[in-house]
Amino acid sequence: MSDQSEGQPRDPGSAGGPPATEHHSAAVQRARADVAAGREWKARDRLVGHLADRYDAEALELLGEVHYAMRDLPSAGAAWFGTNRRGKDVDEAVEAWRERHADQFGQMWRSLPRTVRDREGNKRVDALRARAERDAPAPVSAPATAKGGVDVAVVIAVLVGILFVACALVGLVTVLRWIVPG
């Protein structure tokens, strides 16, 4: 387990991260530039947008680092939970994430980025998915609707419409009586 200094991004190829590659996504490169320029908030927004429609382990790990640097430990924990990263910083962040959700597994599950929830194969994420599904309340069934019956809302809407037209006609007749004598 590596212990890294607080708020310092790690090399993605280091222990616990994805293998180092020569190719980084443009969003990750721009986010790293944002962090270097002191714009962690912009890096966070860029990474969240990038992860909205694709799984990118490097971006997910960097998102956790950005949240950690911003001292948003629960969000860092949610991001890092979906990675292979380990260490004291990860343990601290995951503990804060669990505390935020009071170990409500359904809430914890929904707080993970969608692309992490959609991707199978991470043992911790798969275990959380199973626990959230097991603890989920039974779905509420919709009330049975009468077949062939008239919906009360439609009846009320028709009556309101008729009343509106009647009032408009009475108003029109009254105005015409004022304008046209006798």
Image (spheres, rainbow, N blue to C red):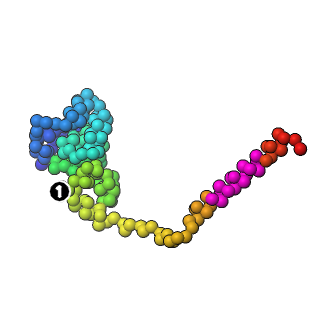
Q: Quadrant of residue 108?
A: bottom left
Using residue 12 as the reference point, say whether residue 175 is left or right of it: right
Q: Nearer the viewer, residue 31 or 16?
A: 31
Using residue 29 as the reference point, say whether residue 151 is left or right of it: right
Quadrant of the snapshot with the C terminus: top right
Q: Badge 1, how many Cα within 10 Å: few under 14, some, many 20+? A: few
Disc 1: which residue: 121
Q: Amino acid at mark 1?
A: Gly
Q: Secondary structure at mark 1?
A: loop
Is residue 93 shown to the viewer in this render?
no
Residue drawn at point x = 32 percent, y = 59 percent:
106
In the image, residue 168 lies in the stretch drawn in magenta = yes
Magenta-drawn segment: 158-172
Say if 82 sits above or below 132 in the image. Answer: above
Residue drawn at point x = 25 percent, y = 63 percent:
130
In the image, residue 135 lies in the stretch drawn in magenta = no
Q: Nearer the viewer, residue 126 or 23?
A: 23
Q: Percent x, y for residue 55? A: 22, 47
Q: Nearer the viewer, residue 20 or 3?
A: 20
Q: Percent x, y for residue 19? A: 10, 43
Say if 157 sits above or below 45 in the image. Answer: below
Q: Quadrant of residue 56?
A: top left
Q: Residue furthest top?
A: 37
Is residue 159 shown to the viewer in this render?
yes
Residue drawn at point x = 33 percent, y = 56 percent:
107
Main structural element of the magenta stretch: helix, strand or loop?
helix
Q: Percent x, y for residue 30? A: 23, 32
Q: Quadrant of residue 29?
A: top left
